[in-house]
Image (spheres, grey):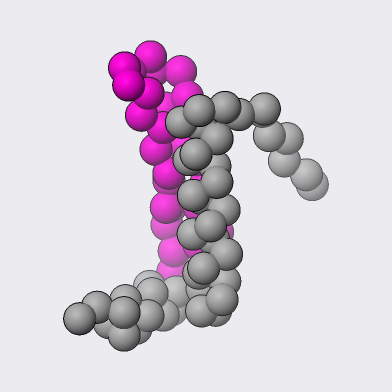
């Protein structure tokens, strides 16, 4: 199944780009967050300035442990 993406501009495009960048960085460490996406509910809230959120979603314990390990090596 394919997902359609709306043509995005401004904050929405930035949120989609950063979401893709995060997904790619996580993949390089062997981590996949299956629910990682731009929060569609924040597209139309009308905040000024616009505030589009990235939804990190849920993950299982194994993925959480991988994420913790990566963060521990990255933290000072």
Q: Position of residue 43 (x, y in %)?
A: 47, 24
The residue lying furthest to the right in this view is 1
Q: Is residue 67 left or right of residue 14?
A: left
Q: Quadrant of the C terminus?
A: bottom left
Which residues lie in the magenta part?
32-60
Residue at the image position 54 percent from the left and 42 percent from the top: 16
Residue at the image position 31 percent from the left and 85 percent from the top: 73
Residue at the image position 42 percent from the left and 27 percent from the top: 42
30 relative to 39, above or below: below
50 relative to 32, above or below: above
Residue at the image position 51 percent from the left and 50 percent from the top: 19
Q: Quadrant of residue 49?
A: top left
Say if residue 32 shows up in the picture.
Answer: no
Q: Is residue 71 left or right of residue 55?
A: left
Q: Position of residue 67 (x, y in %)?
A: 38, 74
Say if residue 52 shows up in the picture.
Answer: yes
Q: Position of residue 48 (x, y in %)?
A: 31, 17
Does the segment drawn in magenta span residue 62?
no
Does the segment drawn in magenta span residue 56?
yes
28 relative to 43, above or below: below
Q: Main secondary structure of the magenta part?
A: loop
Q: Position of residue 12 (x, y in %)?
A: 51, 31
The residue lying furthest to the left in this view is 76
30 relative to 44, above or below: below
């Amino acid at each position: 199944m394919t997902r359609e993406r709306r043509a995005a501009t401004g904050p929405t495009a930035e949120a989609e780009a950063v979401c893709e960048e995060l997904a790619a960085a996580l993949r390089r460490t062997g981590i996949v967050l299956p629910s990682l996406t731009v929060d569609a509910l924040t597209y139309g809230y009308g905040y000024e300035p616009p505030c589009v959120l990235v939804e990190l979603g849920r993950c299982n314990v194994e993925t959480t442990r991988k994420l913790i390990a990566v963060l521990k090596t990255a933290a000072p």
